[in-house]
Structures are given as C-alpha cells and as structure tokens.
Image (cartoon, rainbow, N blue to C red):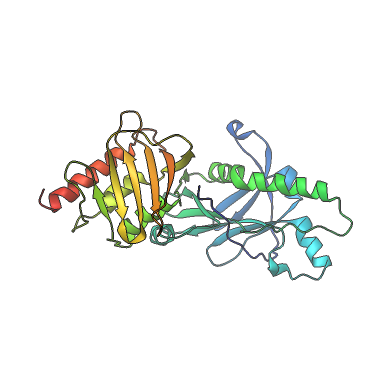
C-alpha cells in the first residue's frame, strides 16, 4: 500500500497576540487560544499553547507555522539555527484551484488539502517529512517523546477540525494522492493521453477528443482504502496505461461497485496486485458508474 510522507517546513520566530476562544460543544467545548493572520484563525487548545511557537508570516502562501517550543529551545542551546526547522509540526498554507490541480498530478508528500473557502481558496496542512524532535540536554526522553506524540496527534486531525470550526465559510475538502489519484489528475489536468478505457462491450477505447475532466471530477474526494479482500469476480472496466505497464480495474458487480484493483506488470512478467475499496464523501457515488459513463463517451467518439 502506498503511504504518504511529509514535506519539511522551515520556521521563523514572530510575536503573536493570542485571544480567548471557545469551540462549540460538538468539538469538546475546550478553551482555545486564537491566532489570526490574513483574516483566518488558528485555534490552539490552551493546554498546548505554552508548548508551541506559532509564527504568522506577513507574506507568501503560509498563514501559520507551528513548532514545539522545547525542541526549538533545545536546538538553540546547541547552537542550531532557528531556521533549521527543529520542532516543526506543521504549517497552514493557501492555494488556488489551478495550483492544487497541478499539485495533484504528482506526489504531494507532506501536503494535505483539508478545507475550501467560499472564494475557492484551498487550505493545506504541510508537515515535515522527517522527525524534528530535539531533546534538551538531560531531558526525560520518554516524557519528551510523549509530549511530541501528543502534539503530532493534535496536528494530524483535530487541528484541522478546529480550524474549519473557527473560520465560518470553510468546508472540509479532501483529495487523495494514491497512484490512481495521480493518474486521474494527469488525465484530467495535464492532457495525458497514453491510456485506454475498456470493457467487454466494445473493447479498449482511446481518448480521442473527449474531455475527461467532467467525469473525473466526480471522483474527487475518493478515499482509497487498502483491503486484503479478493477483487470481486465478474465484469469490470479497465483503465490501462500501456507505457507504464500498469492498469486499474473497476468492478461492475452489484454491491462492490467501488472495488478497485491496481495491477503493475514488471519486466520479468511478474504482476503485483493491490485491491482497494473507494469511499466517497456523499456515500452515494459509485466509481463504476463514473467509469461506465466515461467509457460510453469514449465509445461514441470512437464511432461505436
């Protein structure tokens, strides 16, 4: 199963003006501290506030960068430059739709789109790709590790939920970055045409002049979950990339329309199969239905 790693972010110090903030009952009703930059609010649990350094850049795409104070101070004590990024936990950055589309066409290691504003601005959480924990001399390393894990757990999910809750008009947004997601993004946004789509109905269909974007946008937000189940028997659509010796099979079976199989063929003829179950935010979209509609558009363009 393909896993994501994280992008390293450098930090710089800045003065901030925290204000009291309380989230709704749905989000634990815990007292928070509020940091504001560019009209956006980062809500930090009060119990964590003294453990963190929050920087609010005045320019660039980053709204906030957040680091563990203990690691930064431990690095300073050893003469490590603050810009080395010790203690880095995450930054929150913004991007427009065109930028995000370009990003989706490659490995978005360390970057997760997690929210969208009413004006179409996307919000990303960016994380270091390596561990930036630094131990102070003579520190209790077990206690330091526990604190580090606690802060990373918050940064990984709850921070995003609280950011959305603290900024009216934001809605949750998710883009996957698996091999399939990258392939679909390349087809939709980079005019990549080295592929065919096939079923038993007409066989392989070439792209022709069919715009794939309207079909593939229906698959946005698809969460590909690895499963050790066997790929279902029966008919399926095939998205094949001949030059890359790779294909993706989309099951048409009743009740298993969101099963996807990735097959990579190596030079020696050996194949590696990985089976996923796709999940969609609306809990109604069927990957197979999207592939079938796309296939019929391709078939019509190919004179079938």
- Image point 28% across, 57% down: which residue? 195
Q: Which residue of the protein is positioned furthest toward the top in this rendering?
A: 255
- Image point 41% across, 57% down: which residue? 266
Q: Which residue of the protein is positioned furthest toward the front in this rendering?
A: 268
**How many tags in the picture?**
0
Q: Is residue 126 left or right of residue 81?
A: left
Report x, y in % for residue 278: 41, 39
Looking at this view, is 45 or 9 the one in front?
A: 9
Q: Which residue of the protein is positioned furthest toward the left in this rendering?
A: 303
Looking at this view, is 290 or 193 the one in front?
A: 193
Q: Is residue 38 left or right of residue 28?
A: left
- Image point 70% across, 47% down: which residue? 151
Q: Is residue 190 left or right of residue 150?
A: left
The quarter holding residue 98 reads: bottom left
Report x, y in % for residue 146: 76, 45
The quarter holding residue 87 reads: bottom right
Q: Is residue 236 left or right of residue 209?
A: right
- Image point 43% across, 53% down: which residue? 179
The quarter holding residue 234 reads: top left
Looking at this view, is 233 or 165 the one in front?
A: 233
Report x, y in % for residue 232: 36, 33
Report x, y in % for residue 213: 29, 53
Looking at this view, is 237 or 13 the one in front?
A: 237
Whether residue 125 is visible, yes or no, is: yes
């Amino acid at each position: 199963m393909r896993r994501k790693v994280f992008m390293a972010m450098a930090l710089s110090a800045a003065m901030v003006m925290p204000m009291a903030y309380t989230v709704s009952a749905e989000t634990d009703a815990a007292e928070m501290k509020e940091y504001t930059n560019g009209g956006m609010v980062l809500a930090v649990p009060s119990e964590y506030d003294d453990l963190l350094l929050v920087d609010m850049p005045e320019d660039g795409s980053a709204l906030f960068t957040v680091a563990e104070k203990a690691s930064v101070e431990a690095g300073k004590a050893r003469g490590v430059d603050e810009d080395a990024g010790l203690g880095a936990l995450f930054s929150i950055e913004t991007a427009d739709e065109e930028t995000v589309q370009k990003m989706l066409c490659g490995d978005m290691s360390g970057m997760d789109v997690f929210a969208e504003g009413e004006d179409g601005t996307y919000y990303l959480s960016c994380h270091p790709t390596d561990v930036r924990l630094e131990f102070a001399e003579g520190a209790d390393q077990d206690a330091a590790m526990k604190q580090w894990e606690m802060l990373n757990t918050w940064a990984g999910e709850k921070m995003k939920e609280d950011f959305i809750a603290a900024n009216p008009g934001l809605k949750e947004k998710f883009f996957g970055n698996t091999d399939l997601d990258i392939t679909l993004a390349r087809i939709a946004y980079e005019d990549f045409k080295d592929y065919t789509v096939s079923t038993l109905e007409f066989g392989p269909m070439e792209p022709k002049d069919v715009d794939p974007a309207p079909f593939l946008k229906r698959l946005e937000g698809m969460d590909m979950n690895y499963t050790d189940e066997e790929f279902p028997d029966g008919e399926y659509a095939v998205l094949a990339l001949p030059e890359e010796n790779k294909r993706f099979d989309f099951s048409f079976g009743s009740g298993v329309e969101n099963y996807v199989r990735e097959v990579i063929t190596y030079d020696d003829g050996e194949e590696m199969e990985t089976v996923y179950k796709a999940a969609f935010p609306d809990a109604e979209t069927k990957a197979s239905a999207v592939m079938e509609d796309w296939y019929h558009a391709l078939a019509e363009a190919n004179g079938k």
